[in-house]
C-alpha cells in the first residue's frame, strides 16, 4: 500500500450543529467506506443513501443540494471540500436531517474530524479525472476554466462590487497540508442587506455571526474581524474544491475561476464529464513512478506509511 492509494477515514467520528437555512440541530458522522465507494451522504432518518454525484445536484442557488428518491441533503459543499482537500476518496457522511451542519461556516471543523478519525490507506489505487484539454464555461463576466496540470490547483478571483471584496484573488496548489493551512478556515460570507430577504422566505434561520462573515456597506460586522484579509477569496476556493468533488474522483487539473459560484462550477463539472476529449480517467498504478511523484497528497496527516 502506498501514498497513491485510495484513502478513507480510519474510524467513525461525529459532530453536532445547526443547519444554516433550517436552523434545526443535526448530527453528522464521518464513517469509513470501502475502496471505490466514493463519498455518499446517508439520511439516517430516512434510510436513504445519496452518492456525491453531479447528476444528483438539484439546487445551487445559495448552497449545493443533492437529492435521490425524494430524499434531499443540502449545503454539502464544505464537507465535500474538506474530504477532497484532505485526499479522502471514500467516506459515508451520515446525517439525521436534511442539511449538513454549518458549524463555523468554514471547512475547518470537518478537517478536524478527519484528523480526529485518522486516515486509513486502502489497497486500491486512486483513480483521477485528468484534464487533457482546456475546457471552460462562461456566463456574462463569470468564468470557470480547467486546464491540464500535473497537480490540482485552484485560482479564484472574487468581485462583488463591494469596497471590501473587489478584485480579490487567491490561488492554491492543493495538497492536504496546504488545504488545511490556507483555506479550510475561511468562512462563508453574506451581505446584511441579503439576510432579511433570505429570512423572509424562510432561509438562513440558523445564520449568525458565529457561522458567517456578515458585511454591510462598508464594514465587517463580526467583532473578531477576518481570519485573513482575503478570507472571501479563500472561501470561494474552498467552495470550488467542494463543487469539483462532484466529479466523483480527485482531479488533476488547474481551475481558473472568476466570479464563479456553485451553479457555474457545476456547469463546468457537467461539461467535463460530457466531453471525453477533454479528460481521461487514470488509475495511478498505471502511471510511471515519475508521474506518481508529482501527485497531490504524497504525505497525509495521520496517513500510514507505505508498506
Ligand atoms: Zn461556502
Image (cartoon, rainbow, N blue to C red):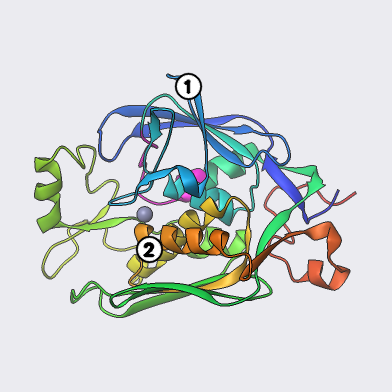
Answer with left or right where residue 86 lies relative to residue 228: right
Answer with left or right where residue 48 lies relative to residue 125: left
Residue at 65% x, 73% y is 132
Give the class, few, some or many, for how many residues have Cα within 10 Å of label 2's Cα (few <14, many ≥20).
many
Q: Is residue 100 located in the magenta-colored stretch of the structure?
A: yes
Labels 2, 1: front one = 2
Name above or below for residue 7 compared with residue 4.
above
Give the structural element (helix, strand or loop) at label 1. Answer: loop
Could one spot residue 227 in this view of the protein? yes
Seen from the viewer's position, the closer of residues 225 and 49 is: 49
Q: Which residue is mark 1?
A: 44
Which is more N-terminal, label 1 or label 2? 1
* Highlighted range, magenta: 99-110
**At which x and y percent is residue 135?**
52, 74
Question: Image quadrant of residue 290?
Answer: bottom right
Q: Is residue 192 located in the magenta-colored stretch of the structure?
A: no
Q: Which residue is mark 2?
A: 264
Q: Is mark 1 within 8 Å of ligand 1?
A: no
Residue at 59% x, 66% y is 174
Residue at 73% x, 58% y is 299
Magenta stretch prevailing secondary structure: loop
Could one spot residue 145 in this view of the protein? no
Amino acid at each position: 500500500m502506498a501514498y497513491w492509494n485510495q484513502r478513507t477515514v480510519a474510524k467513525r467520528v461525529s459532530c453536532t450543529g445547526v443547519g444554516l437555512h433550517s436552523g434545526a440541530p443535526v448530527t453528522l458522522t464521518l464513517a469509513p467506506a470501502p475502496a471505490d465507494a466514493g463519498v455518499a451522504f446517508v439520511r439516517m432518518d430516512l434510510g436513504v443513501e445519496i452518492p456525491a454525484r453531479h447528476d444528483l445536484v438539484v439546487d445551487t442557488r445559495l448552497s449545493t443540494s443533492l437529492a435521490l428518491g425524494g430524499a434531499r441533503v443540502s449545503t454539502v459543499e464544505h464537507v465535500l471540500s474538506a474530504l477532497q482537500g484532505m485526499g479522502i476518496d471514500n467516506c459515508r457522511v451520515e446525517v439525521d436531517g436534511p442539511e449538513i451542519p454549518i458549524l463555523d461556516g468554514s471547512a475547518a471543523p470537518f478537517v478536524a474530524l478527519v484528523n480526529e478519525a485518522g486516515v486509513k490507506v486502502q489497497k486500491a489505487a486512486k483513480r483521477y479525472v485528468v484534464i487533457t484539454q482546456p475546457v471552460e464555461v462562461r456566463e456574462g463576466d463569470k468564468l470557470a476554466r480547467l486546464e491540464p496540470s500535473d497537480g490540482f490547483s485552484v485560482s479564484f478571483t472574487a468581485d462583488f462590487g463591494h469596497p471590501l471584496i473587489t478584485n480579490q484573488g487567491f490561488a492554491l496548489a492543493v495538497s492536504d497540508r496546504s488545504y488545511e493551512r490556507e483555506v479550510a478556515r475561511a468562512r462563508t460570507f453574506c451581505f446584511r442587506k441579503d439576510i432579511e430577504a433570505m429570512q423572509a422566505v424562510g432561509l438562513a434561520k440558523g445564520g449568525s455571526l458565529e457561522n458567517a462573515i456578515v458585511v454591510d456597506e462598508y464594514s465587517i460586522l463580526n467583532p473578531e474581524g477576518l481570519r485573513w484579509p482575503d478570507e472571501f477569496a479563500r472561501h470561494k476556493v474552498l467552495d470550488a474544491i467542494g463543487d469539483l468533488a462532484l466529479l466523483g474522483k480527485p482531479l488533476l487539473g488547474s481551475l481558473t475561476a472568476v466570479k464563479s459560484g456553485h451553479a457555474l462550477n457545476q456547469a463546468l463539472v457537467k461539461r467535463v464529464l460530457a466531453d471525453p476529449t477533454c479528460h481521461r480517467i487514470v488509475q495511478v498504478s498505471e502511471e510511471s513512478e515519475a508521474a506518481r511523484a508529482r501527485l497531490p497528497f504524497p504525505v497525509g496527516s495521520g496517513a500510514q506509511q507505505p508498506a
